[in-house]
Image: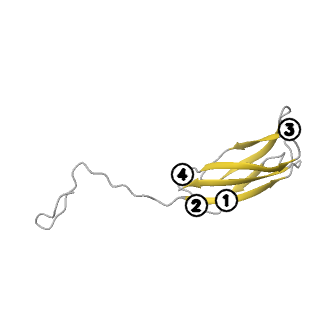
Amino acid sequence: SLPPTNGRFGIIDGRLNVDVEDTVVRDGVEINVTEENEGIIVYKFDKKYYTVPQIQYRIVYADADCQVDLKEITKDGFKMGLKKIGTNEYVNGMVDFLAIGY
């Protein structure tokens, strides 16, 4: 930026960068397979995101060796299930997660 000239400021080839504080949601989800949900839960964020957040997760426990099936991540929430390794059946369990975005 330039010093004031006749009461004005100028910016040459400049850029304004604003650091927005991250929005963070930490929570856990209990997944119980039923006929209605077929093993997929829908989680809605209780905080507002302006971009799709990154999701980190860890399986707390599960009924079988499985992997997290995380899908349809949006600014509003996501869908998640636990798929049994080898069969792709959904199983019961609990997952802790951390969503970070702004």
Query: Is label 2 in contact with label 3 (beta carbons under 8 Å)?
Result: no
Q: CA distance from mark 2 to mark 4?
A: 9 Å
Residue tagged by mark 2?
48
N-terminal-most mark, 2 or 1: 1
- Inspect the image, locate mark 3, and give the three-letter code of the amino acid beneath it: Glu
Indicate which disc, 4 or 3, sits on the residue closer to the N terminus: 4
Q: Nearer the viewer, mark 2 or mark 1?
A: 1
Q: Label 3: state its secondary structure.
A: loop
The three-letter code of the residue at mark 1 reads Arg
Mark 3: give few (<14), some (14-19) or many (20+) Cα within 10 Å.
some
Q: Secondary structure at mark 2?
A: loop
Label 2 crowd (10 A; few <14 / some 14-19 / many >=20) = few
For the residues labelled 2 and 1, the Cα–Cα distance comes to: 14 Å
Question: CA separation, marks 4 and 1?
Answer: 17 Å
Which residue is located at x 86 percent, y 33 percent? Answer: 87
Q: Quadrant of residue 71?
A: top right
Q: Is residue 56 above or below residue 87?
A: below
Q: Nearer the viewer, mark 1 or mark 3?
A: 1
Q: Are marks 2 and 4 in contact (CB under 8 Å)?
A: no
**Amino acid type, label 4:** Thr
> Mark 1 — residue?
26
Residue beneath label 4, please? Answer: 51
Q: Residue 89's mark?
A: 3
Position in image of residue 23 (x %, y %): 56, 60
